[in-house]
Image (tube, rainbow, N blue to C red):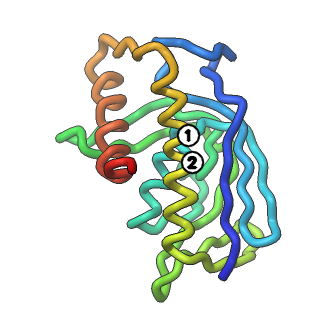
Amino acid sequence: MGTFHIEAWDFQWIMGDLDDPEDLCLHGSVRVQIGQTVLEDAGTVSATALYLLKTLTEDKLSQPGDIQMIPCCGHFLIPNQDLSQVTISGCDYGTDWSVLHKDGQIKLVLPTGQVEYVDPAEYRQEVFAFADKVEDYYRSCSPKILPQDTFSRDGYIAFWNEWHRRRGPRS
């Protein structure tokens, strides 16, 4: 079975502060190992965590114009109507790979074409550990001051609704 490991550190809000009650998107440094390949980038780790959680049940294809697995930024959190799901829109910069569910395995495909198959239970464990670390940082900071405008507020609410639905209870 192949290797997948992802970690994050140097958490901060967009202005570089360690705490900012008005900033909704957490940034940091990310290192991912897929097989023998190690990728490292700085990006919006909150978006990375949510998109990793999505890949536990959904395929994610690396495509131009789509959000990356480690996106540089997340300009907008676009909620669906019932606030159960969010789409994150950012810029074209970041580090990406595809995640596919194939024959009972997780198939990771790098832009180079390199393929690595990972055990789903091990993949889930890595994703949960990454997401939990990000959420723990949010919890260690001041409570967020929700935006006044409905679109931004609903996007943030939908973000956490989807996160907690996909993550499930923490043990």
x, y percent for residue 128: 49, 53
Tell me which corner region of the image, top left, top right, bottom left or bottom right, holds residue 18: top right
Q: Residues within 10 Å of mark 1 (few under 14, many from 20)?
A: some
Kindly give the residue lying farthest to the bottom in the view shown: 103
Q: Nearer the viewer, residue 99 or 3?
A: 3
Q: Residues within 10 Å of mark 2 (few under 14, many from 20)?
A: many
x, y percent for residue 16: 69, 17
Q: Which residue is mark 1?
A: 133
Q: Give the CA distance from mark 1 to mark 2.
A: 5 Å
Q: Residue at x 82, y 70 (%)?
A: 36
Marking on residue 171: none
Looking at the rendered structure, the secondary structure element under dot 2 is: helix
Q: Residue at x 32, y 49 (%)?
A: 169
Q: Amino acid at mark 2?
A: Phe
Q: Is residue 4 left or right of residue 170?
A: right
Q: Residue at x 56, y 77 (%)?
A: 119
C-beta proximity under 8 Å, tags 1 and 2 = yes
Seen in the picture, residue 85 relative to 37 is either above or below; the reply is: above
Looking at the rendered structure, the secondary structure element under dot 1 is: helix
x, y percent for residue 55: 46, 62
Q: Quadrant of the N terminus?
A: bottom right
Q: Is residue 42 left or right of residue 166?
A: right
Kindly give the residue lying farthest to the front in the view shown: 171
Q: Nearer the viewer, residue 146 or 135?
A: 135
Seen in the picture, residue 144 relative to 131 is either above or below; the reply is: above
Q: Which residue is mark 2?
A: 130
Q: Residue at x 54, y 29 (%)?
A: 137
x, y percent for residue 114: 74, 76
